Image: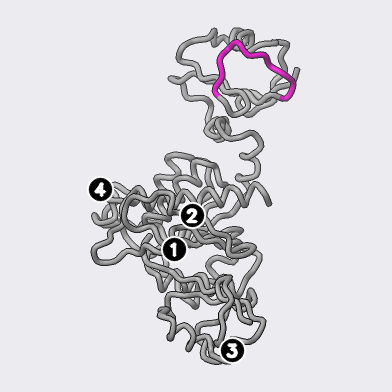
Amino acid sequence: MIKINGEDVQGVEGISVIDYLNSNGYNVNRVVVEKNLEVVPRDNMNNVLLEDGDSIEIIQFVGGG
Amino acid sequence: MKIVLNGELYHTSCKTAKELSKELKFNENENDVFILNGYQESYDICLKEGDEVFLINKNTLPPKEQWEKIICARHTPGIYEKVKKARVAIAGLGGLGSNIAMMLARTGIGHLHLVDFDTVDLTNLNRQQYSVCHIGRFKTEALKEQLLDICPFLDIHIDTVYVTKDNAFHLFKDDDIVCEAFDNAECKAMLTEELLSKWRKTALIAASGMAGYGNSNGIKTRKIRDNFYICGDEVTGAEQGIGLMAPRVALCAAHQANLVLDLIIKS
């Protein structure tokens, strides 16, 4: 089981972080992803895979300030 | 009895505020301001050992060495000593950052670190703490000048630079708390990634989603984990058709500034 933003998500094991973001409509340059409380560096998102037991937090930024 | 009067230790035998006012030759004048333990009170009240009392005349400027404590007279007692030691950085001095800076300066945050590369232009004035006289000046310098006009005793360090992936960590490494206050979503994500991945002792308070108007209660503070918070509605971005306006931007800035205080006081 993988938790993404607090919800259990099925069928995403083995997918890279970048593929998950792209196939779920996220703008890769506007998010910060934490895997088990560790930041996944943007230039390493294609190498880091979603694995059973992971807790993933995707923080999505919108513009304005 | 020992009390603290206008920030200094004072011995008195007066039992009430009325007697103290007479002793200090204020004589309950209508131009006096009397504050007891952070709260404006009437002269009928009794005094007790250790009370923090401020008594000033509205039309007379007290000695400069007393200003700092008198400006903070309405604070909850004990707060001033804590905030005076804090080091807080603000990354971006637009609608969020300039408002956060004003609030933190009025709170007496001892060390402020202001970072922005940009100059003030007319399109900033709908929500940012600048005036026509600041047009064309660096935001760092224009803001520092205004903050020192309000609280001359603050220690304000400015960096007039564009924050990048390469300089972010070095720029903010000495700060206890960093407020992310950029306009651009990619810059927000970049700074958050850099600070969170390299350095965990510092608290980061980011902002996302404060465009438009209305729905005040949609602006929230969310704790992601220890030392990482996000303020805003996390949805409403600035885009064509949705502008940035003073009230909602200031609401989000106030969330960030209020959390800064909370973190400092609880630390």
Tag 1 secondary structure: loop
Q: Residue at x 65, y 41 (%)?
A: B81
Tell us which disc is closer to us: 1 or 3.
3
Q: Which residues are magenta?
A: B40-50
Relative to B227, B138 lies left or right: left
Distance of mark 4 from mark 1, alpha carbons? Answer: 32 Å
Residue B124: x %, y % from top left? 29, 55
Distance of mark 4 from mark 3, alpha carbons? Answer: 56 Å
Mark 1 or mark 2: whose residue is earlier in sequence: 2
Residue that label 3 marks: A13
Q: Nearer the viewer, residue A25 or B73?
A: A25
Residue that label 4 marks: B132
Mark 4 or mark 1: whose residue is earlier in sequence: 4
Question: Mark 3 is on which residue type?
Answer: Glu
Q: How is the image coloured?
A: one colour
Residue B211: x %, y % from top left? 34, 58
Residue that label 2 marks: B220
Distance of mark 3 from mark 2, alpha carbons? Answer: 32 Å
Where does the N terminus of chain B fall, quadrant-wise?
A: top right
Question: How many residues crowd around disc 3 within 10 Å: few (fewer than 14), some, or many (20 or more)?
Answer: some
Relative to B37, B105 lies left or right: left
